[in-house]
């Protein structure tokens, strides 16, 4: 039963039933009256009209059932030797429904019915006319010609109705595919946004905590010997923690908005980043040559900032306290970044930090390479400048 009947709303079902009743009234009652009456038997005419109108009423609810009912009406009409009637137009609606709303089997049963029905009706009309006429005056060649002409005319009408339904079916499938594609793209964008926020959260929290830990360790060792240094370290911890809290709140707010709704770090914030690392006790020797152009895209500025932030955080966490050498070169086609420092051990290649640096560069068409050799950890990144000449 679940496969025989399609789910329909009450409104749609009411509309179809009403259409069937109106069709019966127009095709079976009013039609013959306006056409000057008919000599056909009323019982057979009304029975055929009821069968065809019923098939039309259930065409969308159950295309398979509607097709079976239409065939029942056609067979009954041929048994009663009734000529074509207005109620036969319901067959066109049934064939349309088999192609538009039926399953795969019903779809091709509708197509086969249009061919078989066209041939059957042509054969019936020609033979019934020959039997009811004067056989001696009709040659076999004329009979064959009549069958062919009737078959072609009937097939054009029936196949055209089926093809119209097939077009509706195809359009509906295309719309469903587009909707599925739209949902998939929305899910992909949401996943990318979650990944972006996760990277930003890692960059902010990891960098800030590294600074706080370094300052706290320094303050603990200097507590007895240099109280002034302790106060300065606590001030740096307070400032860094407040900045990190502000960034985290911004990232959480962006969960409800787009990426562009909130401010993002730019090249102008690099000096503050260097000062934070210096305040944590690591000397940052930054060289920027050539200087950046005036129209660097915001996405590239953000990528440069986040890569440097993570590289300096790694130097703070894993370095041996020696100076960190930072080189930034803005060329006509790309920008190259190099961060080198002595390290007690190499950061994990599978950690979020290195993966995040690589993803940052890839998002703007660049690449990031890291290497650890003889106690020296080096991060190299190259980012194209988006088609600048």
Image (cartoon, grey):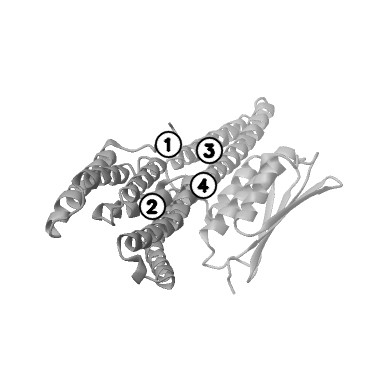
Real-space Cα distance between discs 3 and 4? 34 Å
Please give the residue where the numbered disc 4 appears in the rendered image: 184
Please give the residue where the numbered disc 2 appears in the rendered image: 95
Residue at image location 37% in from the left, 37% down from the top:
7
Real-space Cα distance between discs 2 and 1? 16 Å
Real-space Cα distance between discs 3 and 1? 62 Å
Contact flag, marks 2 and 4 (Cβ < 8 Å): no
Residue at image location 56% in from the left, 49% down from the top:
272
Residue 133 lies left or right of residue 43; in this view the side is right
Question: Can residue 385 be seen?
Answer: yes
Residue 37: x and y, percent?
Answer: 13, 56
Please give the residue where the numbered disc 1 appears in the rendered image: 4
Going from the N terminus, do you reach mark 4 or mark 1 first?
Answer: 1
Q: Nearer the viewer, mark 3 or mark 4?
A: 4
Quarter of the figure that contains the N terminus: top left
Please give the residue where the numbered disc 3 appears in the rendered image: 244
Going from the N terminus, do you reach mark 3 or mark 4 first?
Answer: 4
Going from the N terminus, do you reach mark 2 or mark 4 first?
Answer: 2
């Amino acid at each position: 039963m679940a496969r025989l009947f399609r789910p329909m709303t009450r409104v749609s079902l009411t509309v179809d039933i009403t259409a069937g009743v109106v069709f019966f009234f127009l095709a079976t009652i009013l039609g013959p009256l306006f056409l000057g009456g008919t000599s056909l038997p009323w019982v057979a005419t009304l029975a055929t009209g009821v069968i065809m109108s019923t098939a039309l009423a259930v065409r969308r609810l159950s295309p398979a059932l509607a097709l079976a009912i239409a065939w029942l009406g056609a067979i009954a009409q041929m048994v009663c030797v009734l000529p074509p009637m207005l109620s036969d137009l319901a067959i066109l609606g049934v064939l349309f429904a088999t192609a538009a709303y039926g399953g795969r089997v019903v779809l091709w049963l509708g197509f086969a019915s249009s061919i078989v029905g066209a041939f059957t009706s042509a054969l019936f009309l020609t033979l019934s006319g020959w039997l009811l006429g004067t056989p001696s005056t009709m040659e076999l060649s004329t009979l064959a010609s009549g069958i062919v002409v009737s078959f072609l005319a009937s097939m054009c009408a029936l196949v055209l109705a089926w093809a119209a339904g097939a077009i509706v079916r195809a359009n509906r499938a295309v719309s469903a595919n587009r909707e599925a594609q739209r949902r998939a793209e929305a899910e992909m964008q949401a996943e990318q946004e979650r990944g972006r926020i996760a990277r930003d959260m890692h960059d902010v929290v990891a960098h800030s905590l590294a600074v706080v830990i370094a300052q706290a360790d320094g303050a603990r060792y200097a507590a007895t010997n240099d109280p002034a240094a302790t106060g300065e370290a606590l001030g740096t911890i307070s400032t860094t923690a407040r900045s990190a809290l502000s960034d985290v709140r911004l990232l959480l707010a962006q969960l409800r908005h787009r990426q562009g709704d909130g401010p993002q770090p730019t090249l102008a914030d690099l000096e503050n980043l260097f000062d934070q690392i210096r305040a944590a006790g690591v000397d940052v020797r930054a060289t920027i040559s050539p200087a950046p152009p005036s129209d660097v895209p915001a996405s590239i500025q953000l990528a440069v900032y986040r890569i440097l932030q993570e590289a300096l955080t790694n130097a703070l966490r894993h370095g041996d306290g020696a100076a960190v050498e930072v080189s930034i070169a803005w060329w006509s086609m790309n920008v190259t970044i190099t961060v080198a420092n002595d390290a007690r051990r190499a950061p994990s290649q599978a950690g979020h930090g290195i993966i995040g640096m690589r993803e940052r560069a890839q998002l703007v068409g660049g690449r990031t390479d890291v290497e650890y050799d003889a106690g020296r950890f080096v991060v190299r990144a190259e980012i194209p400048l988006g088609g600048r000449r």
